[in-house]
Structure formats: structure tokens, C-alpha cells
Amino acid sequence: MTLENAQGVDTPVFDFDKFGFDKAIIKSIKNESFSTPTPIQDLAIPYVMGGSDLMGIAQTGSGKTAAFSLPIINKLIDDYQKPASHKPKVLILAPTRELVMQIGKFIEIMSRGTPIKNLVVAGGQSYQPQIRKLKYGVDILISTPGRLIDHMGSGNVKLGDCQTFILDEADRMLDMGFIDDVIEVRKSLPEDHQTIMFSATMNEKVRKLSAELLKEPEYVEQERKTVVADTISHRLMNVRRKDKLALLISLLQDEAIDKALVFARTKLGADKLCDELKAAFEGTDMRIDAIHGDKKQRTREKILLNYRKGRTKVLVATDVAARGIDVEGISHVINYELPIEAENYIHRVGRTGRAGVRGLAISFCDPSDVRLLRDIEKLIKLPIEVDEEQRFHFDISDVSDFKKGKRTRAKGPRSPKSTSRRPGRDFSARPEKRKEKPYKSESQRPVWEKNEKPARAKKAYDPLQDSYQLGAAVFGDDPVLKKLHGKAGKIKPAIPKAKKTDEPKGKREKLYGKKSEKPAFKEREKPAAKRREKPKDRTSGTQKQTGGFSRFSPKGKSSARRSG
Ligand code: AMP
């Protein structure tokens, strides 16, 4: 918001005064060059200040961190008392190490000039410094669930003084299987505490969790025109499975890519794809890495650092591993395999098109993906434009519908090959073999065809000869295809079942899932006063979205939340 002053020069209106924040906080807000609260801040701050429980629906980029942090810091400053040893006054739980660190940095910046002390505790860090600081006393503890439970178990954290409990990205918590830990933590909180929950989406599982955790909550939601940020362009590439790798390699050569994030469905798939790309680009300066849950924390951090610094251009990731990725400058998200859960599409593509900079999301679609694609388009309320120019394009509607492992022909003339069954067939009338589209320019020619000594790459990556076998070897064991086609037995599984995905399994069904359970409130209505009974089992769900709010001050961009 701007006002014209006497000289006709636009000056921003400072609109944070209305909340009555302490002057130290106002100073920090000004230092960050925030002038106007975001919509979610406008809605949520008064409720948090007033002490109500709150359910907020807002995505990353909406300013939700400030929406809960600023009033919390303000409340602590009012009538400040030094925290007791091991007893934080505010607990913030978030699903990933990266996210807790971002929240910690933001709180650090916003509480400058105040006595407020915060501490971030997360896995992968040494315990001793954390224990020392906890003993000394912290006002705000920001933690991932696992590490918090560890500290609680050894008596380093006691929640008896905790007045405020904040659960950020609740949908991701559910998705990552942390729900039992969250419930466990909640049991240790004093009866009379305030709970604030934020989630990117409001689905059935989040509703059930909110019914479990919140007392007479207020409900706020950030209005969004589109589900995904309009800074992201979407492109669909119809490609046969056997040609996927060749298409990816040619894209990585052709496109003006700063940083690409390529999604595979499984950890094994991500590793294999990474190896194949490395082999294909051997001898070039293209650096490729893979990140997934089987890699050690330290290795993951190193991989991310290289990616963030631009040393790695292509990062192959699984859905869960990618959740911790908050990296600037990702120009391309490539869905080598479409996500099984449509919601994950939003989550994946949200890694690009950030801070008002445009990004491109390219999705590969083979005939078996059509159903997944429909779900995605329904969710994002947007038909994804098909790129018919890419050289592996084919009309997917010409291809059979796969049902129970059988491929039935789509409408159209009978294949000329069928003449072989007829007596007296004319061999000279045999159709010509299907020709690949020629390269549009020499620069499009794949690296393995240009390479002087391409022995290794050529062997593995000639799309016209070997990639079919390669594709079958790598993805013939695709668990999703099995599921979709309902003929698991037909494909020899090469991936050991239990280790196929990053998704934490096992715990999921435990707490929620009873259809009969109704949420404590309807969306946009004031929730019912009574709390629900503790649910008996649970399900999971996730969605992370970007978009909607795009008010980024230049300073805001370089602030702690962005430095990741
Ligand atoms: P978040 O949704 O919490 O991840 O915040 C996204 C980004 O917006 C962060 O870099 C914040 O520093 C920034 N931000 C938060 N509130 C405001 C505001 N009122 N004006 C401008 N930028 C903001």
C-alpha cells in the first residue's frame, strides 16, 4: 500500500501499528522493510494476541511465520519473566530441520532488542550445546518432533511452563508420520495452553487433528485465486516410458536451466536416474546429485549446500526429501514420474516460481499416468498444456487404455500388421517403421550422440536402441504402475517392497480414519465449542502450496526466511 506525499512521491504506508506491538518488534518489522501485513497476518494476529486457539490455512510465502511469531513475541515481552531451566514458554513444532531453522532465524530477527531467547533443536545436530542452552532457559523452543521427544525423554525439556503450542505445516506432519509424536508432546503440555495450528490445506486428516488439538478454535484462511502460484508455467510432455530418459537428457541440454529439480517416486528410482544422468553427461560440466531419505543427514546437507550454491545444476529428489528443500533460483521442476498423490504435484512445483520469479514445471506423462494427470488437473483447476513440439511426443489418446495389465486398442483403423493372419498376405505392403522426429537443431542432438568417445554413455542411453531395455530395467518394477494396472504379479519386482518409498509407513492407520468422526468445525464457520473425543486411528495427507500472496519487499527476499 502506498500514499502520495506532498512531493507526489509514493511512500509506503506502515500498517503494522494497528496491532499494538511492542516498539522493539515494530523496529524489527521496519528493519525488514515490511510495511503492510499480509492477508493471513491481518486475519490471524488479533486472534493469537487475544489468546484463542487458531486453525490457519496458509501456504509458504503467505507470511504465516510472522502471523504466529510476532504476537507470540509480543506476549512474551509483556510482563517478561526469565524462563525457568529446561522449561520453554512457547513450543513451535515443524516437520523438517530446514523449516525449524527458518522459523528460528525469523524469530531471532524479530526479537532483536528484546530479552527473548529462542532455541532451535533438530536432528543431525550435536546434543550438548542444545542441552546447555535448555538448562540455561529459553523462551521459545523450535523443534522437530523426533528431537523434542528425545530431549523430553532425558529430562532436558519440560513442558510444564509452556503457554503456547504452535504446530506449523500440520499437513506435512501428518504426511511424514509424526502424528503420534505430536500427540505425545501435547500430553505433556499444561491443560490451559493456547494452541495454534497452521496447514497448507484443510483436508479430512487435518480437520481430525485440529479436532484433537484445538479448543474452540478460530478459523482463518488465506484467500487464493489459484491453487498454484501464477508465477509457475506448466507443461506436459507425452512420452513413452522407454523414451523418458532420452527426453530428460535432451531437456537438460536444451532448456535454459539455472537449477532443475527432478522428481522420481522412489529412493531407488532417484539413485538410478541420477547415475544414468551422470553417465550421460560424463565429460561435461553438468553436476547432478540425488537426495532422499536413505542418505545421511550430513550428506543431505552437503548435497543441498552444493545445490543452493549452484554447484549442482540438477537434483533428483523424492517427494519426502524435497520437503526440506527451500532453495532459491530453481528454474525448472521436472516430474520425471508424476506423483501418486495429486496434492504432491502442488508441493513439487511450488519449489519453483518463488518470490515473484517465473518458473517452469514440466511433467512427463506416459499412458499409464493418465489417471494421475486427471487428478492433478482437477486439483489445480487448470488443464496442463501439452508440448507437441518435443521430439518424443505422441498422441496419448491414440494409445490404448491400460486395464488390468491388458492393453486394448483405442479407436482407429486396425493395424496393418494384422494382415499377417490373413492368407495370401502381401509382404511388400508392410508399413514403414515409425520414424523418430528429427532433431530441430544440432544443439538438440543428445550428448551421447555428440560425444567423441561415447562408449559408456552410448551403450546406456541410445534412445533408439537401448532405452527400452533400460526403461524396463529401471521402471518395470514401478510399484505405482502395478497398483494402477492391478497386475502386480506380471512385473517382476526388483525393488524390495519395504524399502520402496520415502513415505513413513506403519504408523499411519493408528490414530485417525474413522469416517464417522466429524470435524470440530466447518470451514469458515466458527468451530463448535466442544472438543471431540480422541480419535482412534488416523490417516495421512499433505499439500504444500505456494501462490496467492506475492508481496515481497526486496529486503524481505534477502531476509532469514529466504536464506534457507
Ligand atoms: P512465510 O510464508 O512465513 O514463509 O514468509 C514468506 C516471506 O515473506 C518471508 O521471506 C518473510 O520474511 C516475508 N514476509 C512476511 N511478512 C511480510 C510482510 N508483511 N511484508 C513483506 N514480506 C513479508
Image (cartoon, rainbow, N blue to C red):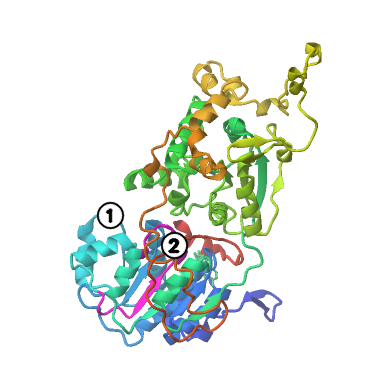
- 108 over 529 or under it: above or below: above
The verdict on residue 160 being magenta is: yes
Location of the N terminus (image quadrant) = bottom right
Q: Amino acid at mark 1?
A: Gln
Q: Position of residue 70 (x, y in %)?
A: 44, 76
**Residue 58 point in image, percent of width and height:** 53, 69
Residue that mark 2 sits on = 539
Residue for point 39% across, 59% down: 508
Horizontally, residue 435 falls left or right of residue 279, namely: right
Which amino acid type corresponds to the residue marked 2 in the rendered image?
Answer: Thr
Q: Nearer the viewer, residue 19 or 279?
A: 279
Chain-order first, disc 2 or disc 1: 1
Q: Which residues are magenta?
A: 159-179
Q: Indicate which disc residue 32 carries.
A: none
Q: CA distance from mark 2 to mark 1?
A: 30 Å
Q: Is residue 311 magenta?
A: no
